Image (cartoon, rainbow, N blue to C red):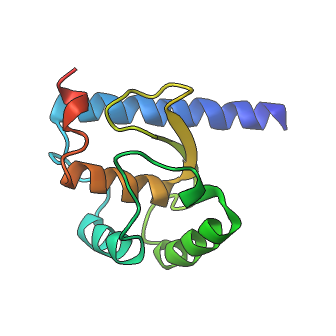
């Protein structure tokens, strides 16, 4: 079990590093994170209009009520988003890099919703200025 968790951690960190390199090299909003980005963003903002992607609050993802709401939201994307429920990391504050203090475990669909919103709302612009 420990080896499996280590493999997940290595894969999640690789994904995070790859995303940051792409974000810094190409710039936010200059690439698509998934083929259904427009639909996903509209649906996300319709279901989570008050979720502040400028500073993530774990309670918006981790409480039982939040988990249930996300689960209901995400099921429609099974088969439409690759690895839609695969674990990954997201930055809590988009102005910072991935660090232990600035990272949170989420599933891929949540990552996509947050990062697409950040790109479209100009919140990832600060990372490219570094």
Residue appearing at x 46%, y 40% in the figure: 92
| 78 sits left or right of 22 in the view | right
Q: Residue furthest right?
A: 1
- How many marks the image carries: the answer is 0
The vertical placement of 20 against 70, above or below, is above
Foreground of the two, 82 or 42: 42
Location of the C terminus by quadrant is top left
Residue 56 screen position, x and y as percent: 46, 48
Residue 70 screen position, x and y as percent: 55, 69
Residue appearing at x 42%, y 71% in the figure: 80
| 4 sits left or right of 33 in the view | right
Residue appearing at x 26%, y 35% in the figure: 23
Residue 120 screen position, x and y as percent: 20, 55
The vertical placement of 103 against 61, above or below, is above
Location of the N terminus by quadrant is top right
Foreground of the two, 49 or 42: 49
Foreground of the two, 12 or 128: 128
The vertical placement of 32 against 80, above or below, is above
- Does the rendering let one see residue 52? yes
Foreground of the two, 128 or 54: 54
Residue 117 screen position, x and y as percent: 29, 56
| 16 sits left or right of 2 in the view | left
| 126 sits left or right of 78 in the view | left
Residue appearing at x 53%, y 30% in the figure: 13
Q: Residue furthest top?
A: 130
Location of residue 98 by image quarter: top left
The vertical placement of 97 against 104, above or below, is above
- Does the rendering let one see residue 33? no
């Amino acid at each position: 079990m420990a080896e499996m968790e280590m493999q997940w951690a290595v894969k999640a960190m690789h994904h995070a590093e790859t995303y940051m390199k792409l974000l810094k090299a190409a710039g936010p909003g200059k690439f698509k994170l998934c083929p259904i980005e427009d639909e996903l963003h509209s649906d996300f903002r319709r279901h989570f209009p008050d979720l502040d992607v400028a500073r993530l609050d774990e309670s918006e993802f981790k409480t039982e009520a939040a988990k249930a709401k996300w689960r209901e939201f995400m099921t429609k994307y099974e088969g439409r988003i690759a690895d839609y429920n695969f674990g990954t990391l997201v930055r809590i504050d988009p102005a910072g890099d991935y660090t232990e203090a600035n990272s949170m475990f989420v599933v891929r669909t949540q990552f996509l919703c947050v990062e697409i919103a950040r790109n479209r709302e100009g919140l990832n612009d600060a990372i490219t200025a570094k």
